[in-house]
Image: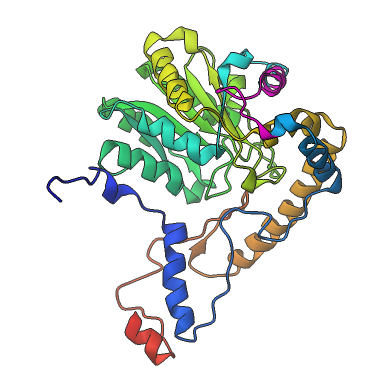
Amino acid sequence: MRNNIVHSGAGELTYEIREIVSIAEKFEKLDVEIFWENIGDPVAKGEKIPLWIKEIVKKEIDSDKSFAYCPTKGLLETREFLAKKCNSNGGAKITADDIIFFNGLGDAISKIYTYLNAESRIIGPSPAYSTHSSAEAAHAGSPHITYNLLPEMNWLPDINDLRNKVHYNPAISGILIINPDNPTGMIYPRRVLQEIVKIAEEHDLFIISDEIYANIIYGSEKTARLSNIINGVPAIAMKGISKELPWPGSRCGWIEIYNKDKDAVFARYIKTLLDAKMLEVCSTTLPQSVIPEIMSDPRYEKHLKERNDEYRRRAETAYKIFQSVDGVEAPKPSGAFYISAVFKNNALNNGQKLKIENEKAREFV
């Protein structure tokens, strides 16, 4: 090419959870048996969508409006419903104008980082969720900045680590929370969230809280929505229906914006996100249109409880299995679909090897 057309952050676009699939496919061709799992898709894992939810969707399809464009921010009726739902929980007060729909939270994540000033950084948790960490790193053209989650403390964040990194790195403009966390299954207790809000207040930062798993909580620890503890700090909460209905193929997520009026720079940044959405016209109409009826149905809470009870049983099973393995630490998850296991310090050394019986696989390795 006459000019270098490659983005400066192209090397940071990695997604190990998906990239490992191509490696596994090569092993499969070498006659190595692969046990295929999935990446956060409960439908692919065999979950059945309740018939009453399907009936609501089928009924909505009969309306020609479900095939049309919707307003750039999303359907007004749905945004009003979600704003009222948020306000009923106390804390930050929002209106329909503080909600913007996207084609799934992947779309929202991409835009949130793409339209940040290139010199502004968002610090996020480690272990990291690749969609956030890669998008943030790519926007800045350098590795994602993280604060530590500690396995010996049930994956709770190291608040001192976060505070020090924010204090000594003036480029950090925001803090990312994933609550419940992907990939650890940890939830942020209210007291920890309040500490993070305090750090944001002290350093004039904004907060992003990915709450896609907010209704998939089954542990004993209590948490809070960001809206309940945000005080006057500018913030974005990310929500959707992909995990809890579950309907990942809907590509339907939204952001709730808190305290936009408290900071002129933050307000201008939010306007940039909306301007970027205008270029796309709108997000998918059909899934937006059924949200109020599904979520206000008395069967919805029962649906969520039954799923959480099942995930509690699965989490307990996985936890017991890992407890029996020497040298491995795997705290019991409290939410989302995941459990993270790590080797304990000094469990491994440079002299250990795994024997590979398959000669072709050994050569490939």
Q: Is residue 128 visible?
A: no
Q: Residue placed at 73% from the left, 17% from the top?
A: 88
Pick whichever, 250 or 162, lies toward us.
Answer: 250
Pick whichever, 217 or 286, lies toward us.
Answer: 286
> Considering only vertical position in the picture, is 309 above or below 67?
below
Q: Residue placed at 41% from the left, 54% from the top?
A: 15
Q: Is residue 231 left or right of residue 299?
A: left
Q: Is residue 84 magenta?
A: yes
Pick whichever, 185 or 104, lies toward us.
Answer: 104
Q: Position of residue 156 (x, y in %)?
A: 51, 41
Question: In the image, which residues are magenta?
Answer: 67-85
Task: Using the rendered view, name the quadrant where residue 214 is placed.
Answer: top right
Q: Position of residue 120 (x, y in %)?
A: 30, 27
Q: Residue placed at 65% from the left, 33% from the top?
A: 285
Q: Position of residue 332 (x, y in %)?
A: 62, 53
Q: Is residue 124 magenta?
A: no
Q: Residue placed at 65% from the left, 23% from the top?
A: 75
